[in-house]
Image: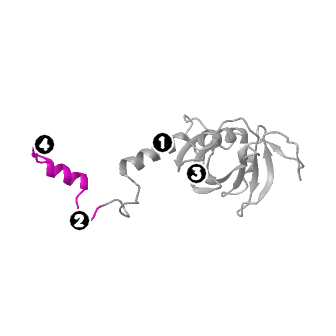
Amino acid sequence: MAILKFRIYWEDDDSVYRDLAIRHGQTFFELHLAILKCFEFDNKHSATFYRSNDKWQRGKEITLEKYDKTYRAEPLYMKECTIGSEVRDPNQKFIYVYDFHKNWTFLVELIHIDRDGDEEKTYPACVRSEGIGPSQYGTKGLINEKLAEIEEKYDLNTSVMGDGFSEEGEADQEGDLEADTEGASQDEI
């Protein structure tokens, strides 16, 4: 059974992507759920795929359900449509849109076909994760906390000396004061 490996880019930043491996006989619904899981999104909103060309133009729609909108052609349904049936070439592309109000858009590109997949492995599987993904409902708390820790730890505030380092031979003023007062009696200070 062939395994298809897709690279899913976040449209706003192509350095943020996830690689997903999925069997060619699995459905777009399974791919939809796997993308949400890889990017840590919930499954509460509407979604659709579009078959695409090399210029990322939207073609045939593969939708979660029929929505209240006008379709140029009758859409396919994620739960009924297998991925292998929509792959037309070895560099096949799809556009995935999630939550039509927020319009999260991901570019899905076929990057590898493995004719002999690992039968013991569970698919779909996220096999690579690059970059910090977008937060579905605002800023991820972990990012802000980690950034604050890094700023605090390394004193990234550059207002004192352009890059945070003192010039050679200069000593920290507090360090000088402590060194001068070490060993001196209280009266001498």
* Labelled pair 1, 3 in contact (Cβ < 8 Å): no
Label 1, secondary structure: give it: helix
How far apart in space, not on screen, are marks 3 and 2 (Cα)? 43 Å
Q: Report x, y in % for residue 99.
A: 73, 43
Foreground residue among 96 and 117: 96
User: In the image, which is nearer the foreground, mark 1 or mark 3?
Assistant: 1
Q: Is residue 16 above or below residue 67?
A: below
| Residue 168 numbered tag | 2
Mark number, residue 17: 3
Are the residues flagged by discs 3 and 2 in contact, CB closer than 8 Å?
no
Sequence-wise first label, 1 or 4: 1
As measured in the structure, the alpha-carbon distance from the residue carrying label 2 to the one carrying label 1 is: 33 Å
- Residue located at (46% from left, 44% from top): 146
Residue beneath label 4, please?
A: 186
Please report whichever mark, 3 or 2, sits nearer to the chain's N-terminal start. 3
Q: CA distance from mark 1 to mark 3?
A: 23 Å
Q: Amino acid at mark 2?
A: Glu
Q: Earlier in the sequence, mark 3 or mark 4?
A: 3
Which badge, 2 or 1, is on the more N-terminal residue?
A: 1
Label 3, secondary structure: give it: strand
The reply to whether the C-beta atoms of the residues labelled 3 and 4 are less than 8 Å apart is no
Distance from disc 1 to disc 4, alpha carbons, whole Å, reads 42 Å
Most common secondary structure along the magenta stretch: loop
